[in-house]
Every structure is written in structure tokens, then in C-alpha cells.
């Protein structure tokens, strides 16, 4: 395990860090010297990710579901033990039924689960962690272009992400008066080659989608620079050779090519 004093360095909590974007963010931030708190529902997979990260940085991992109050309290205890959080990345989310149903066919139980996971869980987690957020902390809510575009079959998922975007915008406006040092970002990472995206298109070849690791430099900019609160598209943040340099350092030149 890395020997850095984790009470004096930047600490980020990343939900849903066992696969996809969360996994890539954990590796990317670890290589930039961030201490990490990560979670996921798959205990075995979470343990594997923790073991991968341990030689790079200090990492604390706890398995659980962010929709449960007990797990959110456990995450708050870990954050307190790290002397607070510099960043909260609400990445964990649910797609809903696969194949994606139309609005007229989605059942109430699936819709409620989407709203619970994609909007209620990140906000209640933030509420639980509110006193663990350090000055100048960054709150990052991962959203989707389905929140603003009417893609067929994406009604339930898109509605839950649209709700997340609106509540993020209101939160940003509220914090602008009460905690102007803090930033709130709701970020659309774009299409990616992930298990979730594959589930949205069962049986289709999605190998043309970019790897999640290619989106990491966009999140690095939001966490390490001082951009204003707001909605961002990851692709639009990747505009400079500096971003390409970060990407090469994080994930290797083969991903950039």
C-alpha cells in the first residue's frame, strides 16, 4: 500500500467503482495522487479493484448499495476517518430493464427503482456526507445525453437523469450563496464501451464506442481546476494537448490512438 499520509492529501469518494467509468476514474485519480474511497455491490469485484489500486495510493473499499441508509452511513464514517472529502463522484446508477421498454410499457416498479437509484440515492448520499465535505469540495453527478434528448426506449432512464440534472442545478444555485467555495458539476460522459451500454443494446456490436478511460481527463479538469458549477459534456472538455498528455499518462498511448 502507498505510504502517503491520507489525512493530508486529496480524497475522493467514487460510487460504483468496480466497472466502467467508475473503475477508470478510480485508476485515473489514483495515478494523480488522490486518496480514494470506493464502493460497489459486487464484493468480490470490489476486492479485486481495491487490490489493484492499493500499490498506487491509499484506498478504502466498502461493498454495499447506495440506495440503503446503512451503506450511506458507512461511507460517511469512512469519509470522516479521512478527515473529509475533497470530491464526491456520484457515478453509481441503473439502466432499468433490458431491452429498453417504451414509455407505455415500462412498469411502475422499474420506474421507481430508476428514480431511487439515479436521483434519490446520490442526493441522500450527499445529505449524509454534507458535513464531511471540505472547503472547495467538488460534487460530481454523472448524467447522460438521454436526460436532454428523446431517444426511443430511454424514457425511464432519461427521466431519472433529467431529474438529477435539475436537482444538481438547484443545488449549485443554493451553494452559490451558502458555500461559494464549492462546485457542483453534472457531467455527460457520452457513449462509452461499458456493460451498461451493452445492456441497452443487447446483441449489438458496441466496439466503436470509446473506452471509459478516454473520459477521465475531462473529470480531472473539473476536479483539479476551478471551472464554474454547471452541466458539462466530457468530450467538450477534452480540447487540448494537455488533456491528451494526461490521458497517455493515465491509460497508455494505445487508448489515445
Image (cartoon, rainbow, N blue to C red):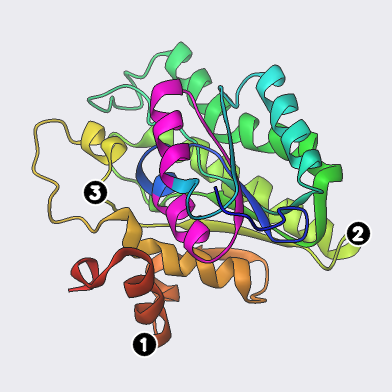
Q: Is residue 16 above or below residue 108?
A: below
Question: How would you rate the neighbour count of disc 3 (Cα within 10 Å): few for under 14, some for 14-19, many for 20 or more?
Answer: some
Q: Which residue is mark 2?
A: 178
Name the outermost residue toward the bottom. 241
Rendering coords of residue 101 (x, y %) = 28, 24
Q: Could one spot residue 105 in this view of the protein?
A: yes
The residue that appears at 60% across and 27% down in the rendered structure is 66
The residue that appears at 37% across and 25% down in the rendered structure is 96
Q: Which residue is mark 1?
A: 241
Helix, strand or loop status at disc 3: loop
Name the outermost residue toward the right. 178
The residue that appears at 50% across and 20% down in the rendered structure is 113
Q: Earlier in the sequence, mark 1 or mark 3?
A: 3
Q: Which residues are magenta?
A: 24-52
Residue 227 quadrant: bottom right
Residue 33 is a magenta residue: yes
Q: Earlier in the sequence, mark 3 or mark 2?
A: 2
Helix, strand or loop status at disc 2: helix
Q: Which mark is residue 193?
A: 3
Amino acid at each position: 500500500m502507498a505510504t502517503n499520509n491520507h489525512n493530508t492529501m486529496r480524497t475522493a469518494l467514487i460510487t460504483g467503482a468496480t466497472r466502467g467509468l467508475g473503475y477508470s476514474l478510480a485508476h485515473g485519480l489514483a495515478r494523480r495522487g488522490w486518496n480514494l474511497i470506493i464502493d460497489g455491490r459486487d464484493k468480490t469485484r470490489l476486492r479485486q479493484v481495491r487490490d489493484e489500486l492499493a500499490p498506487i495510493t491509499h484506498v478504502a473499499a466498502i461493498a454495499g448499495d447506495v440506495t440503503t441508509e446503512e451503506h450511506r452511513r458507512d461511507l460517511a464514517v469512512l469519509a470522516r476517518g479521512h478527515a473529509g472529502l475533497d470530491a464526491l463522484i456520484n457515478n453509481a446508477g441503473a439502466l432499468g430493464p433490458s431491452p429498453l421498454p417504451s414509455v407505455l410499457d415500462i412498469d411502475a416498479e422499474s420506474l421507481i427503482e430508476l428514480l431511487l437509484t439515479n436521483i434519490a440515492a446520490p442526493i441522500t448520499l450527499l445529505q449524509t456526507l454534507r458535513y464531511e465535505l471540505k472547503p472547495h469540495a467538488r460534487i460530481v453527478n454523472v448524467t447522460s445525453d438521454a436526460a436532454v434528448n428523446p431517444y426511443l426506449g430511454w424514457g425511464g432512464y432519461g427521466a431519472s437523469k433529467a431529474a438529477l440534472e435539475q436537482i444538481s442545478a438547484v443545488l449549485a444555485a443554493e451553494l452559490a450563496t451558502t458555500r461559494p467555495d464549492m462546485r457542483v458539476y453534472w457531467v455527460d460522459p457520452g457513449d462509452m464501451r461499458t456493460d451498461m451500454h451493452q445492456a441497452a443494446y443487447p446483441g449489438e456490436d458496441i466496439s466503436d464506442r470509446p473506452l471509459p478511460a478516454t473520459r477521465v481527463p475531462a473529470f480531472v479538469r473539473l476536479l483539479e481546476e476551478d471551472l464554474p458549477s454547471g452541466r458539462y459534456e466530457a468530450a467538450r472538455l477534452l480540447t487540448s494537448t494537455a488533456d491528451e498528455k494526461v490521458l497517455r499518462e493515465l491509460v497508455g498511448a494505445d487508448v489515445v490512438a
